[in-house]
Structures are given as structure tokens and as C-alpha cells.
Amino acid sequence: MIYIVRHGQTELNQRSVLQGRSNHPLNEVGREQAQSVGDAFREAGIVFDKVYTSPLDRAVETAKLVAGDVPTECEDALIEMDYGPYEGTDLHDLPPEVEEFFRDFAHNPAPEGMEQLPDVVARAGEFLERLKAEAVNRHILLSTHAIAMKGLLEYLTPESNGAYWSKFIGNCAVYVTELNDGTYSVPTEWSK
């Protein structure tokens, strides 16, 4: 089983600021969220064999709080979307071109300077394909970010036709997929 978790809350999440690849730690709420998810996994008897995390501090810290002392490897494919010149933008005061993109992610290209969503899906998919060799009969945790997580979910559910892009995924939300006969199952939200 592969469990995909979005990192816990940061101060920028709390202030509704577009964080992207800027490197910010969890705040106290985020630490509590990650610890709660870790406790829920332990209560369910789920022990991870391996953990992959985005190299950004908030994802690394989430991984450690969720999985404990399990071997962890940083994976660039799990890093957040590159928002380029728009990182640090107040989500309540977006430039028109970003507002247009956010209005319909599935059909509007990202503004110039931002990573394009098909590229997020491509890097997510390449990583999931590489992961197949070690995912059979193992519990693996992926600690990542909202848009990167949506890229993973889009890759795992091509028939969604972009539906995940506009879906809200909160801090420390968890999705799970299983590998059977070389094919990943449609991911479902995991609840505590």
C-alpha cells in the first residue's frame, strides 16, 4: 500500500500565502496534525517499510512525525509545483493571470514562469512507475504538497480528467493506493 500525505500546516498556509518551493517549517498546528496522523496509523497497526519525502522542510518534518524512525529518502519528484515569480503571493489578492489559472486549472495553462500541470503529472508518474519495483506487499509513505499530491492523484486516475486540480486537499490529508499485478488501484481518501 502506498499512502500519500500532504504536509501539515505552516505559517504561510495559515496566512493564505502561495508557498510553492519556498522552504518553511511546520507551525505548531502542523506538528499536531502530523502527529495525529502518525498516531492514527499506529492505532491501525500500519508500520511503514519506507518513506519518500519532498526535500522541503515541511514535508520532511511531516514524514518524521507520521512515520517515526523509518528510513526516509528525499525525492525531488514529490516537491511542490514551482510557482516561479508568484511564490509569496497573497491568495486573497491574486494577479489576474493567476486568478484565471486557478479558476479552471484543468483547462487554463499556468502563467508564464510557473511549472505547467502536465509537467507535475509527468514527474509524479515517472516516480510512481519507478516505485513499483519496491511497492509490492510493503507500506510506503509519500510526504508531499497539495499540487504535487494532486499530480500523483491525477496520474493514478487518468479518467478524472483534471477533477483533482480543483479539489480541496487539506493539510495532512491522506490518500491510499495499492499495487496489484503491476497496476495501481484508484486512490481513496484514508480516514483515521
Image (spheres, grey):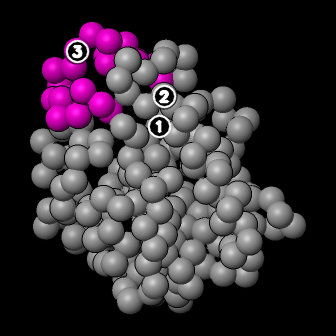
Q: Is residue 26 magenta?
A: no
Q: Secondary structure at mark 1?
A: loop
> Quadrant of residue 5 in the image?
bottom left
Query: Is residue 16 positioned above or below 152 on the image?
Result: above
Residue 129, given in percent of the width and then of the height, sits at 70, 57
The residue under label 1 is 167
The residue under label 2 is 116
Q: Is residue 146 visible?
A: no
Q: Nearer the viewer, residue 86 or 32?
A: 86
Mark sitting on residue 119: none
Q: Is residue 91 magenta?
A: yes
Q: Nearer the viewer, residue 110 or 41?
A: 110
Q: Nearer the viewer, mark 2 or mark 1?
A: 2
Compute the Cα span from label 2 to label 1. 18 Å
Compute the Cα span from label 3 to label 1. 21 Å
What residue appears at the point 55 percent right and 35 percent down from the top-left corner? 119
Q: Residue furthest right?
A: 181
- Indicate which disc, 2 or 3, sits on the residue closer to the N terminus: 3
The residue under label 3 is 95
- Indicate which disc, 2 or 1, sits on the residue closer to the N terminus: 2
> Quadrant of residue 96 in the image?
top left
Start and end of the magenta stretch?
83-105
What residue appears at the point 37 percent right and 27 percent down from the top-left corner? 114
Give neighbour class at mark 3: few <14, some 14-19, many 20+ (Cα, 10 Å): few
Q: Are marks 2 and 3 in contact (CB under 8 Å)?
A: no
At label 1, the amino acid type is Lys
At label 2, the amino acid type is Gln
Q: Are marks 3 and 1 in contact (CB under 8 Å)?
A: no
What residue appears at the point 18 percent right and 61 percent down from the top-left corner? 25
